[in-house]
Image: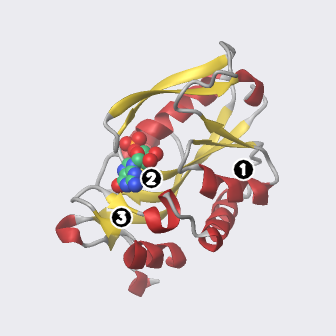
Amino acid sequence: MEQLQRAIIERGSVLSDDVLKVDQFLNHQIDTNLMINIGREFVSRFQDSKITKVLTIESSGIAPSFMAANELDVPLVFARKKKSLTVTDYIYSSGVYSYTKQEMNNITVSKNYLSSDDHVLIIDDFLAHGNAALGLIDVVKQAGASVAGVGIVIEKSFQEGRKMLEREGHRVESLARIHSLEGSKVSFLEELATK
Ligand code: 5GP
């Protein structure tokens, strides 16, 4: 997705050989036009999948997922990282190790919002080692629902997340695939010039 690749190049910053900062358009300040187009791109990739719900994880997954769910005309559910006082024991939960914060989070989703009838599109901002996506898949399985696929805004293809998901038979659609962040330079699997 060219608009996204341009945003990464022009407005992203490489923090280390394996961490990209995208606070300017995705993780803090949000480029709403870009999010609308990201939503449309996810929909075009999963349009034949008969999705009934979009599932993401707070907080950075919400903006791109909101636009996809709106286009698909289905509800958006986000997993919470901290247990809410208003959600009692009626929850699905899964342990997820956070790559950027280097801590374990117990993600939770109320049983009211996922059921065995659901066919779920999982969306997240980044795919690194696959822990967040696998935690969300675990929650979907606990509900007896099915996974339509995993939509990722930015995949770091040099980490093993895609392999982990594909090994379990999941379809992964990433809108930007980063081959390397070495030397403070972002290089994509498919460079802009080849598009
Ligand atoms: P994973 O669970 O696949 O190891 O990592 C994905 C999660 O970690 C995402 O939800 C995202 O919030 C965070 N993350 C992983 N790598 C990066 C990165 O390079 N930059 C940012 N901003 N977040 C990342």
Q: The residue under label 3 is which amino acid type?
A: Ile
Tell me: is circle 1 under 8 Å from ligand 1.
no
The residue labelled by disc 2 is 126
Q: What is the residue that sits farthest to the front in this orientation?
A: 85
Q: What is the residue that sits farthest to the left in this orientation?
A: 183
Q: Is residue 49 above or below residue 85?
A: below
Residue shown at the point (21%, 59%) measured from the top left: 17
| Residue 49 disc label | 1
Q: The residue under label 2 is which amino acid type?
A: Phe
Residue 167 visible (yes or no): no
Q: The residue under label 1 is which amino acid type?
A: Ser
Q: Is residue 81 above or below residue 21?
A: above
Tell me: is circle 2 under 8 Å from ligand 1.
yes
The number of numbered discs placed on residues in the rendered structure image is 3
**Which residue is nearer to you in this view: 116 or 128?**
128
x and y percent of residue 151 in the render?
Answer: 56, 53
The residue labelled by disc 3 is 178
Q: Is residue 115 above or below residue 195?
A: above
Residue shown at the point (69%, 15%) measured from the top left: 90
Separation (CA) of disc 1 from disc 3: 26 Å
**Which residue is nearer to you in this view: 47 or 183?**
183
Among the 4 quarters of the image, the one containing residue 114: top right
Dot 2 lies on which element?
A: strand
- Tell me if mark 2 has few (under 14), some (14-19) or many (20+) residues whose alpha carbon lies within 10 angstroms of its own: many
x and y percent of residue 179 in the render?
Answer: 31, 64
Q: What is the residue that sits farthest to the bottom in this orientation?
A: 193
Foreground: disc 1 or disc 3: 3
